[in-house]
Amino acid sequence: MIRRIWSGMTYLRSAWILCGEMRLRWVLFVPMLLNMVLGFLLLRYGLTGAVSHRLIDALAASANPITIFIFTIIVRFVDILVVVLVTYTAVRFGAILASPLYGFIAVRICDSLLPGQAIPMRSWWGDVRAAISYELKKIGLNVCFAGIALLLPFIPVFGPFIDVGWSMSVSMIIMCLDLTDASYSRRGQTLRARAVELLGVWPEALGFALIALPLVSIPVLNLLTLPWCCAAGMYLATEAHKRAAV
């Protein structure tokens, strides 16, 4: 069991080496650049920065120093929340726009790890449409998980502890579904079929999630690490499909 968890923790390294052997690393840099551009545009023309500075300047003309100080702290806290929201939005839109590239990488990784079991080809619009469909389904899934999370704290004694464990488990599950979407989407597998395959390799999925979750959760850093983690997720999905086939 420990060996399998450790194996999952090495998937990011294995995927990076495999992409190097197939000369695909340059493809990963394209969505990285796209994420950075989207993040810059959202921050430059979004609500953070310019709007908050105008509010502070307007308040400075009529308020006392203490009020200005308190308001400045509040605005800076809101700016941090906006940065988190912006980076999350950027990586989600980036995942949709770069879905044809992720699909291409998924095909190459499958060809390398599962010779003779080619993933069906489709147009770039087909990849984008499938990515949008997945994001909409994920919203419904998140609503269901959130509804359960609201009820857990009411469980006597152990409710808060169960709620924390539930939140961490849901984060790992959603992340694994996100990062394996390119492979499973090309195969036309439903969310239920994906969950069944990933459950068959849950020790590897757990080890992978423990390493990848921090990388895709830290704002700004996730703009760069998400494509790499997606490649590792395709590696995980291919290994899960291989075991399911056996």
Image (cartoon, rainbow, N blue to C red):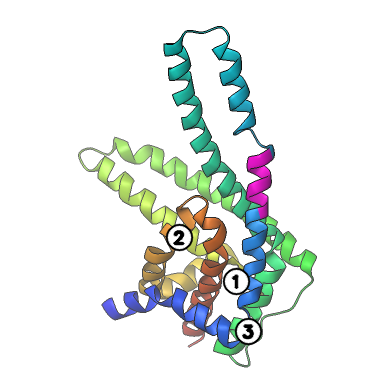
To which quarter of the image does residue 98 belong? bottom right
Q: Picture coordinates of residue 228 (x, y %)?
A: 54, 69
At 26% across and 45% down in the image, what residue appears? 161
- Main SS, magenta residues: helix
Q: Are marks 2 and 1 in contact (CB under 8 Å)?
A: no
Q: Is residue 71 above or below residue 136?
A: above
Q: Picture coordinates of residue 183 (x, y %)?
A: 60, 73
To which residue does mark 1 refer? 184
**Mark closer to the observer (2, 1):** 2
Circle 1 sits in a helix, a strand or a loop, which is it? helix
Q: Picture coordinates of residue 69 (x, y %)?
A: 44, 18
Sooner in the amino-acid sequence: mark 2 or mark 1: 1
Q: Amino acid at mark 2?
A: Leu
- The region drawn magenta spans 37-44
The answer to if 154 sits in the magenta stretch is no
Outermost left residue: 157
Sooner in the amino-acid sequence: mark 1 or mark 3: 3
Front residue of 177/45: it is: 45
At 39% across and 42% down in the image, what residue appears? 149
CA–CA distance in space, label 2 to label 1: 22 Å
To which residue does mark 2 refer? 215
Residue 196's disc is none
Circle 2 sits in a helix, a strand or a loop, which is it? helix
| Neighbours of disc 3 within 10 Å: few (<14), some (14-19), many (20+) | few
At 55% across and 88% down in the image, what residue appears? 113
Instruction: Give the position of the N terminus as an image quadrant.
Output: bottom left
To which residue does mark 3 refer? 23
The answer to whether residue 193 shows anywhere in this view is: no
To which quarter of the image does residue 211 belong? bottom left
Sooner in the amino-acid sequence: mark 3 or mark 2: 3
